[in-house]
Image (spheres, rainbow, N blue to C red):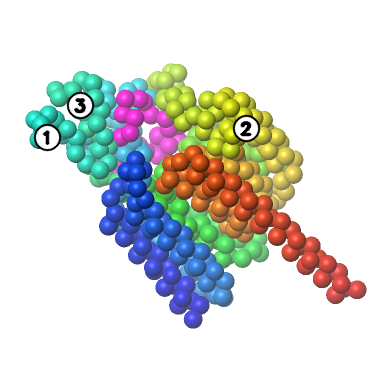
C-alpha cells in the first residue's frame, strides 16, 4: 500500500509539473497580482513532502526503484514546456552558437551588429508592425532592445541583458558549445533541458551510491530526485548551476575517498562552471589541502587560458556589472544584514562572517564525512547572502540529502519566495523563518540524540 501511495503521489507531482508548463503563461513578477504559478509551486512542494513521508513506509529495493522512477518522471515532466521563470538558457544557446562559429563569447554582446549573421529566428524574432504603425516585439519571452544598429532601431531577442557580454566562466562556455555542437542552432530550449535532466539523474545516482555505501538510508536521495526546485530550475529553466552541483558532489565523494588530486580537479571544473561551488571548498580542505587547492586552481586556470588568449581581460565579461546590479557591492542585497548595517557596511560584515564560517568549516569538518560541513557552509552562506534566485540553492539540496537534515529545505523555500514575491519585507520574513526552522530542527535533533544516548546508557547499566 505504501508503494502504491508513493507512486500515486509521484505521478501527481509529474502531472502537476507538466500542467504548470502547459497551462500557465510565462511568469511576470511585475504583474502586481498573485499568479497561478504561485499556487502550482506551493502544491508541488506539498506533494513532494507527502511523497517523502510516504516513502518512509517502503522497504527493500522498492526504495531505490521509486527514487529513480520518481526522478525520471518528475524530471521528464519538467520538459513539457519552455522556461517559465527565466530566460538564462537563451543566453546559453547563443554563447554556444557564437563559439561554434569560432568567436569568443566574451568579445561581443548579442546586440552587436558583428554577430548579425549568426542570429536565429527563435532567439531574435523579426519585429512586427503594431497598430500604431511602429515596429514592436511580440512574445512572452521576447525583450525589446532599443537604439541598436538595425533597420528598425530595435532588436527583438529572448536573451536578457543583450547589450552586455556573457557572465559565464569557461567550463560553462565549453558546455554550451558542446550542447550546440550536437544539436545545431535551430532547436530551442529542449537541448539544455535534456542536459539538466541527465545531470539531475546523475546526481540522484551518485547520492544513492554514496548513501548505500556509507550505510545510510537511501530514502534521503529522494530529497534531491523529487525536489520541485530541481525539476523547475534545474530542468525547466535548465540553469547551468546543475553542472556545478554535479561536479561538487563528485569532488566531495573523491576527497572523502582520499583522492585529493582528482577531487581538486573536479572542484576546479565546478568552480569554473558557475563560481558559486567555491563555497564548497572549505569542507574539502581538512585533509590534503595542498593537493585539493593545487588541483582546483590548476584546472581553473587551464580552462581560462584559451579564452584569455582570445579575449584578454574581456573574460571577466559582465561579472563586475552583474554584482553591482544585484546590489552586492552596495550591500542592499543582504536582506537581514542591511537592517542593521546600511550600505556597503553590510558587504563588509557579510565578508567577515563568511570568512569566519569558512575557517570553522575547514577546522571542524570530518574529512571522511564532509557532507555536514558542506551543508552548514553552503546553507549558512545562502542565508547570509540571500540571493533572489532560488536556483543558487540547488547546490545545497544534495548536502541535505546526504545528511538527512530536512529542516534545511527551508532555505530553498525562502529563496523561492524571493523569486515569486519580490518584496523586501516578505523576503526578510522568509529568510527569518528559514533561520528559525533550521535552528529549531537542529536543537530538536540534538535533544533527541541526547535522550537516545541516555536511554542507551540506562539499558547498558
Which secondary structure, mark 3? strand
Disc 2 crowd rating (10 Å Cα; few below 14, some 14-19, many 20+) is few
Instruction: Pick whichever, 263 or 47, lies toward us.
Output: 47
Q: Quadrant of the C terminus?
A: bottom right
Q: Is residue 176 magenta?
A: yes
Which residue ends up furthest to the right in the rendered image? 461
Q: CA distance from mark 1 to mark 3?
A: 13 Å
Label of residue 340 in the image:
2
Instruction: Pick whichever, 142 or 344, lies toward us.
Output: 344
Which secondary structure, mark 2? helix
From this view, report whether residue 459 is shown above or below residue 407.
Answer: below
Q: CA distance from mark 3 to mark 2?
A: 44 Å
Res 163 → quadrant: top left
| Range shown magenta | 159-185
Q: CA distance from mark 1 to mark 2?
A: 49 Å
Q: Which residue is mark 3?
A: 154
From this view, report whether residue 152 is shown above or below residue 209.
Answer: above
- Residue 331 visible to an observer of this rendering: yes
- Residue 287 visible to an observer of this rendering: no
Residue 329, image x and y in percent?
52, 25
Q: Which residue is mark 1?
A: 130
Residue 348, image x and y in percent?
62, 26
Are the residues flagged by discs 1 and 3 in contact, CB closer than 8 Å? no
Q: Is residue 459 left or right of residue 186?
A: right
Q: Is residue 336 magenta?
A: no
Which secondary structure, mark 1? loop
Residue 237, image x and y in percent?
37, 47
Q: Nearer the viewer, mark 3 or mark 2?
A: 2
Which numbered disc flags the more N-terminal residue, 3 or 2?
A: 3
Amino acid at each position: 500500500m505504501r508503494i502504491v501511495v508513493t507512486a500515486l503521489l509521484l505521478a501527481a507531482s509529474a502531472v502537476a509539473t507538466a500542467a504548470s508548463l502547459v497551462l500557465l503563461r510565462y511568469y511576470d513578477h511585475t504583474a502586481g497580482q498573485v499568479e497561478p504559478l504561485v499556487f502550482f509551486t506551493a502544491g508541488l512542494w506539498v506533494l513532494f513532502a507527502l511523497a517523502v513521508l510516504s516513502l518512509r513506509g517502503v522497504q527493500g529495493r522498492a526504495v531505490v526503484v521509486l527514487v529513480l522512477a520518481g526522478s525520471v518522471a518528475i524530471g521528464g515532466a519538467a520538459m513539457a514546456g519552455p522556461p517559465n521563470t527565466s530566460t538564462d538558457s537563451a543566453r546559453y544557446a547563443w554563447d554556444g552558437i557564437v563559439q561554434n562559429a569560432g568567436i569568443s563569447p566574451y568579445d561581443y554582446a548579442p546586440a552587436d551588429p558583428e554577430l548579425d549573421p549568426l542570429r536565429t529566428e527563435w532567439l531574435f524574432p523579426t519585429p512586427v508592425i503594431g497598430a500604431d504603425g511602429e515596429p514592436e516585439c511580440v512574445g512572452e519571452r521576447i525583450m525589446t532592445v532599443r537604439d541598436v544598429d538595425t533597420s528598425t532601431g530595435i532588436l527583438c531577442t529572448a536573451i536578457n541583458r543583450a547589450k552586455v557580454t556573457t557572465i559565464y566562466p569557461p567550463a560553462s562556455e565549453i558546455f554550451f558549445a558542446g550542447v550546440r555542437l550536437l544539436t545545431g542552432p535551430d532547436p530551442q530550449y529542449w537541448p539544455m533541458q535534456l542536459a539538466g535532466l541527465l545531470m539531475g539523474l546523475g546526481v540522484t545516482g551518485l547520492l544513492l551510491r554514496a548513501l548505500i555505501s556509507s550505510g545510510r538510508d537511501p530514502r534521503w536521495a529522494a530529497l534531491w530526485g523529487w525536489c520541485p526546485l530541481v525539476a523547475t530550475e534545474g530542468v525547466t529553466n535548465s540553469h547551468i548551476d546543475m553542472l556545478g552541483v554535479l561536479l561538487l558532489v563528485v569532488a566531495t565523494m573523491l576527497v572523502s575517498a582520499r583522492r585529493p588530486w582528482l577531487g581538486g580537479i573536479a572542484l576546479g571544473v565546478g568552480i569554473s562552471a558557475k563560481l558559486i561551488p567555491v563555497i564548497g571548498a572549505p569542507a574539502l580542505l581538512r585533509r590534503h589541502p595542498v593537493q585539493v587547492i593545487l588541483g582546483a586552481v590548476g584546472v581553473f586556470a587551464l580552462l581560462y587560458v584559451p579564452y584569455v588568449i582570445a579575449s584578454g581581460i574581456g573574460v571577466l565579461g559582465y561579472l563586475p556589472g552583474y554584482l553591482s546590479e544585484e546590489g552586492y557591492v552596495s550591500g542592499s542585497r543582504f536582506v537581514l544584514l542591511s537592517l542593521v548595517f546600511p550600505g556597503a557596511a553590510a558587504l563588509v560584515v557579510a565578508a567577515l562572517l563568511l570568512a569566519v564560517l569558512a575557517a570553522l568549516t575547514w577546522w571542524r569538518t570530518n574529512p571522511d564525512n564532509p557532507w555536514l560541513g558542506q551543508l552548514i557552509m553552503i546553507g549558512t552562506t545562502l542565508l547570509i547572502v540571500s540571493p533572489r534566485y532560488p536556483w543558487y540553492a540547488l547546490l545545497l539540496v544534495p548536502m541535505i540529502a546526504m545528511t538527512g537534515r530536512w529542516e534545511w529545505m527551508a532555505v530553498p523555500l525562502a529563496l523561492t519566495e524571493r523569486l515569486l514575491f519580490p518584496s523586501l519585507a516578505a523576503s526578510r520574513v522568509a529568510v527569518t523563518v528559514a533561520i528559525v526552522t533550521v535552528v529549531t530542527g537542529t536543537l530538536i535533533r540534538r535533544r533527541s540524540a541526547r535522550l537516545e544516548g541516555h536511554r542507551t546508557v540506562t539499558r547498558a547499566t
